[in-house]
Amino acid sequence: MADVVEMNVDEKAASAAGVDPITLEVVRAGLSSIVHEMSITMDRTSYSTIIREVHDYSCVLFDAQGRLIAQAEGIPIFNGSMNFVIDAVTKRFPLAEMKPGDIYISNDPYTGGGTHKNDINIIMPIFWNGELVMLSASKAHHLDIGGKDPGSWSADAGNTYQEGLSLPPLKLAENGVISEHITDILFANMRVPQLSRGDFAAQIAAGKTAELRAHAFFEKNGVDVFKRAVDELIDHGERITRAAVEKIPDGVYEASGFHDADGASDNPIHIQVTVTVEGGDINVDFTGSDPQREGAAGNCHWVNTVSMTREFVMFLTDTALGGNEGSYKPIHVHAPEGSVFCPSYPAPVTTGMGDMGTRLIELLFQALSEALPQEVIAGTFGNFSCLTLAGFDPETRAEFVHFSPYAGGWGGRTYADGNSAMVSLGSGDNYNVPCEVMETKFQGLLAKRYALREGTGGAGKHRGGFGVIYDYEMLWPGEFTVALDRDKFPPYGLFGGKNGQPSGLVLNPDTPDEKRYARASGVRVPAGTVISHRTAGGGGYGDPKERDKALVLSDVLDGFITVADARDDYGVAIDPKTMTIDEQATQRLRSANG
Amino acid sequence: MGSRLAADIGGTFTDLILLDDEGKPYVQKTPSTPDDFKNGVLNGVHKTLTETNRVRNGAGEIALSDIEYFVHGATVVLNALIQRKLPKTAVITTSGFRDVLEIMRTNNPYMYDMHYIKPAPLIPRRLRFEVTERVRHTGEVLVGLDEESVRAVAHELKDAGVESVAVCLIHAYANPEHERRVRDIILEVCPGIVVCISSDVAAELREFERTSTTTINAATVPIITSYLDRLSGDLREMGLRRDLYVMQSNGGVITSNVAQNLPVRTVLSGPSGGVVGGAYLAGKIDLDNVVTLDMGGTSTDIGMISNGRPITVDESRVESWPILAPMIEILAIGAGGGSIGWLDSGGGLRVGPQSAGALPGPVCYGKGGTEPTVSDACLVLGRLDPDYFLGGEMELDVEGAHQVIGEKIAAELGMGKEEAAQGVVTVVTANMAKATRQILVARGLDPRDFTLMAFGGAGGMVVGDLLRASDVKRAVVPNNPGALCAVGMLVTDFRHDASATMVRSLDQADGSEVAAVFKDLENEALGRLVEEGVSKNDVVAERYIDVRYIGQEHYLKIPVRDSAPDFKRLGEAFNAEHERVFGYCTPEFPCEFVNLRVTALGQVQRPEFPTYEPRSASDGPLKADSRRAIYFDGKDIDTPIYRIESLRPGDSIIGPTVIEDPRSTVVILPGQAASVDTYRNILIEEIDG
C-alpha cells in the first residue's frame, strides 16, 4: 500500500486548454445539480431509518479518468474516501473496458476501497455518444452486513471476517441486468435484508438519475465544455486548499495522546502525529502511533486515515463548495504499515473507522492549536459511542436491529460555546432517529429519557457543549453491542478550558442490577432491561474565570450547572435564594484564584 | 360581492390592490413600517382609497365602509420570530423529553463547517417543563397522566409570569387525551393564559418537528392577537364594517379569529401570495405549468405551479425551525439584484449569497455601497438606463459601477469590464437555474414542461439569461409585476386543511373506520369555512391519504374521491404516483397509509386584469422609443429600447431588445424573441427552439 497518496492525474490532460472562471461556475453548478439530484433520489426512495432519517450516505461524480469532480452535501468521512473506491474498481475493471449498463459494487476496505463493510458502494459509468465521460458513485450505510453481532459493528471483532461479508470490486450488472447471484449472496448474509433491498434499489435509482441528468447537461452545454472545464475545476479545488494551507505558518507541529481502548483489551492506544507545513503543502505523518491492535475499536483503516485527514484540511478551507480531486492534492499522508492508522489485512476496522478517525481529526487540531487558535475547537465527544440494539419478539417472531448516530457535545471555540447534542465532526449532515419514529419502527424499544446531560460540558471561557443521555427500555428480549468513545480519556480542554465529562453505558441504573459497560458485543438482555447510554460533553476553550458572568448564571437557571459549579469552576457566586449574581463575592473569587 | 382590498406587507414596501365591484384593479405602494406594521397598513389603506377615487374621477366614490372583504399578510408573525421578539412562552413535555427542542435533529447542515453554531433554542430550558405520563405510538396509555405533576407545573408557570404555553407530549398525535387534560388543568390554574396543544396544531409523527411547530404557534398567538385587535379596531374606526381576513402560507385565507388560534399557518404567507397570483395569471393566459421567480434585492423566491395549482408542502421551516403545516413550497436562494460578486481563494468568480441589500445597496445606488453587485453589472452592460430607474426618480451612478466592477472583478480576472460584468450575470443565473431545476425535480416534475414567470424588482434584468441557462421552454414577465402578490390574496380560495395520523396496512384497512375519521376532518375543515361566512354552495372538500410501502419512510399524498376508499385502487394509484415521481414502483411490496388529510375550499369571485387593444392604424407602426449600446455576446450592440406603454397586444420584437417600465427592465437576448399579449404580459422564447 502506498504511504503517500498519489492521485492518478494525467499530466497531459491537466495542461490542456482550460476555461474561463465563468464557464467554470456554470459547469460547477451543473455537476453539483447532478449530485444533489442523486441525493434527492436516495432520500425519496430509500426504506430504512438509517438512510431516510439519518441520511447516512454520500453521492459523488468522477470524470472519465476516475478523478473526483463533484460531491453532494453529505458525510465528510465518506466524501474524502471515494477515490479509493474508484481506484479499486478500475484496477479490477479497467475504465477502457466498461460498457453502458454496467454497475459495479464493493464494500471491502482491503480490496474494494471501502470505509467499513456496512457502507456499500455502487458505481455506474455514464456514456455519451458511445464514449465513457463520467462515473457516478454512491456510498450508503446498510444496517447489517452479517458478521458476529447484529449491526456488524463489533468493538471486539478480532479480524475482518467477523465484521461481515466482504465484497471486493464486482460487476453487479451487465447491460443493465443485475446479477441475482450477487444480490442473493448479499441479502442472504444480512440479518434484516428487507430494508436493505429497498436501500439497494435506491442507490441504483440514484445512479440512474445521475446518468439522465448528465445526458441532459451534455445535450444542453455540449460535452466538450464539460471536458475542458474538468481540469480547471480540479485546479481550482487545489488552489482553494493551497490558499487555506498557506495561512498556516510554515513549520513542524506535533501532538500525541491516547484513545480509550481497542475493544479486545483495555489498554489505551498511543497515537501521534507530525504535521509539516511548507507553503501550500501539508504533510501529515502518523509515525510513532501504536502498532495495529487486536480489537476493531483500535484500528483506523488507511482509507479512513486519508479521508479523515482530508476532511480536517477541508474544515480549514472555503467550506461552501465541497471538495474534488484537486482539493486533496496538497495533502500528503503517511502512516507506517501495520500501525493503528494503517493496519494490515486481516485486521478488523469497522469500529475504529469513526472512533479513531474522529480522534485523528482532533489530534490534528491539537497539533495546530497554537498556530491556528482562531480555527481550532476543543475536544468533542468523539465519533458516536456506537450502540446497536437488537430485539426479538418471541410471540410474533418480529425482530429489529437499531443503530443511529448518537450525538454529544462539541468543544468550545474562540468565538462561541461548543454545540450541545451534535453528531460527530465527521458525520456532517447526519440526523438523529426521532424517538417517535424509533418506537413506531422498532416496537420492542421504548425511549424513557432523551435529554441533555447536565454538567458534562467542560468549563471554559467558552464552555463545551453537553452530551446526551439516552435511556432505552427493551420491551422484547434482545442483545446490545457497544463501543464507547471518550470513556477513559475525556474530551480535552484548550487554552485553560477544562475537559468535558466522559461517556458511559449503564445497564438498569439506580437498581441493584446496575452494571457498566464500555466495549462489549452481543450482550444478551431480558425484556425490561433499561440501557442508559450517555455521551460525553465537549471540552472548554479558554479560562473559565473569563466567562461572561451572565452566561454562567444562565446555565445555572437552565439547570445545566449547579450553583456550586458556578462558584468552583467559574468563580461566580450566585445567591441560591434570589438566583442573582453576588458581584462582590464574585470579584473576590475571580481575583483570588486568578 | 362589493369592493375588495388586499395588502401585501413586505419588509420595505406594502403593496395594496383594490378591486371595485366590477373586478377592476387599482394598485398602490407605500413604505412599510416595521416598528409597527399596523401604521403602514393604515397609511396604505388611506392612500389607496384617496388615489383610487381620484383616478375614478367621480365614477362612484369608494369608502372603507364599501369594502366587503379586506385581506392581508401577517408579516408581523414572521418578523417577531426572526427577531426573537416573543412573549414569555413555556413548553410542557412528557417526563424525560424536556430537551427535544434543544437537541433538534443533531445534524450539521454545513458539512465542512465546524464553526457552525447551533441556534439557541426557541425557548430556554428554564421554561421547559415535564409532566408524568406516557403514551405509545399505538395510542395505548403506558403511564397515566399524573395530574398533580401538571398542577405543580401550572403553578410554576403562574409564578414565572408565562403568557403562553405549548404542550407537546410524546405520541400525542396518536392519542390527544393527555394533552387535552393538561390544557384544562393549566387553564384552571392560570386563567387567561394561552395554551396550544400539539395534537391540535400539528397532529403528526416526529417529536422535534411537532414541538417546534406548536411552540412557534404558542409564542406568536399573543403577537398576532394584539396586532389584529389593534389593526381591526383602527380600521373599524375608519369605517370598515367587515372582519379582517389573513393570508395563510398554504395560499388560502382565514378569518382573523382563526388566524389568532393558528398563527403558525400564516408565517410564510408573504411569498405565497406571489405564487397564487402567478397561478391566477397563468390560468388567464393558458399556462398549466409555471415556475415563479420573485427576484428582489437580496434573494429570489422560487415557487411552482403544476396543472394550474401551486405546489404545497406539508413541512417547511423558518430559519432552523420546522413547521408542520401545509404551505406553498418556496425555495429562497441568495440571489438578487444586490448580490455581491467576489473572487474566492482559488480565483473563481462567485456571486452571493452575501448581498448589499437595500442599504447600502449596489454601488450604482450611490448610498455608500462598495461591493460589485448584479445591478452594478447590469448597469455596466448597458442593460439599465441610468436616467430611467424607477421612472427617473432615482439617478444611478454609472461611474461608480464601472469602477467597482473594473477594480474588484475585471482587473483580478484579467478581462474587460463588460466581460466581467457579463460573468457576474452568468454566474448568478447559473445558480438560479440550478435552484429552479432542483425544486422541480425534487417533485418529479420535468423543467421542459414549464414556463418561467419572472417578477420582482430584479427579475426582468436577467430573465433572458435565466431562460437560456435553464431547461424551461419560455419565460413570461407579467405586466405590473409588483402587484402580483397582492393579486394573489384576492384570488385565493378560502382554504382549510385538517389531518390525522392513522397507520394501517392497506390489506387490513377498515373502510368504515377511515370514513369516520374523514367525516370528522371534513366537519372540522368545512365547519371553519362556514364559520367564515362562505356559503355552503361554494365549498368543496378534497380528501387525501398519505401512502407508502411498509418499511419505507417517505410517503406520497394520494387524492381519493370516496371517504371509504377502495384500498386496492388506492394501492394502484400509489404505485402509479411512485412510478411518476421516482421512476419506479414495486407493486409486489405491501403498502400502508399514514395520514388522512382533508382540504376544504370555498370559492371567491376573481379580479379581472385590464386588457389592451391591438395596434390600430392610429397607433402607427411599432417603433423603438430610443436606442442604446448594450453589451451582448462579447460586443456592444446598438439595441432598440421600448417603453411598455408603447407596446400593443400582438407586437413581437426580435432580441436583442429592452422593454422598460418605471418599475422594471426586461432584457431580451440576441436569439430570443418577445411578444406582447392582451394583458401586456411579455412572453419570451428562444428563436431556435
Image (cartoon, coloured by chain):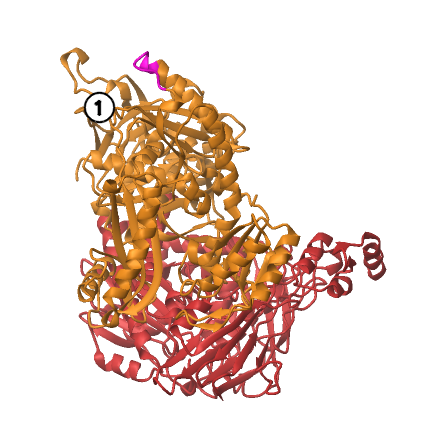
Chain colours: A red, B orange
- Residue B671 visible within the image: no
Q: Please tell me which residue lies in front, A443 or A547.
A: A443
The kind of residue on which mark 1 rests is Thr
| Vertical relation: B369 (above or below) A356 | above
Horizontal and vertical percent for residue B198? 46, 57
Q: Please tell me which residue lies in front, B490 or B274.
A: B490
Horizontal and vertical percent for residue B337? 41, 34
Magenta stretch holds residue B61: yes
Q: Chain of mark 1?
A: B
| Vertical relation: B483 (above or below) B91 | above
| Vertical relation: B336 (above or below) A445 | above
Which corner quadrant of the image does residue B132 belong to? Answer: bottom right
Q: Residues within 10 Å of mark 1 (few under 14, many from 20)?
A: few
Horizontal and vertical percent for residue A27? 33, 50
Which residue is label 1 attached to? B611
Q: Is residue B559 left or right of residue A513?
A: left
Looking at the rendered image, the quarter that the C terminus of chain B falls into is top left
Write the start and end of the magenta stretch as one range. B55-62
- Residue A532 visible within the image: yes
Q: Residue furthest left?
A: B617
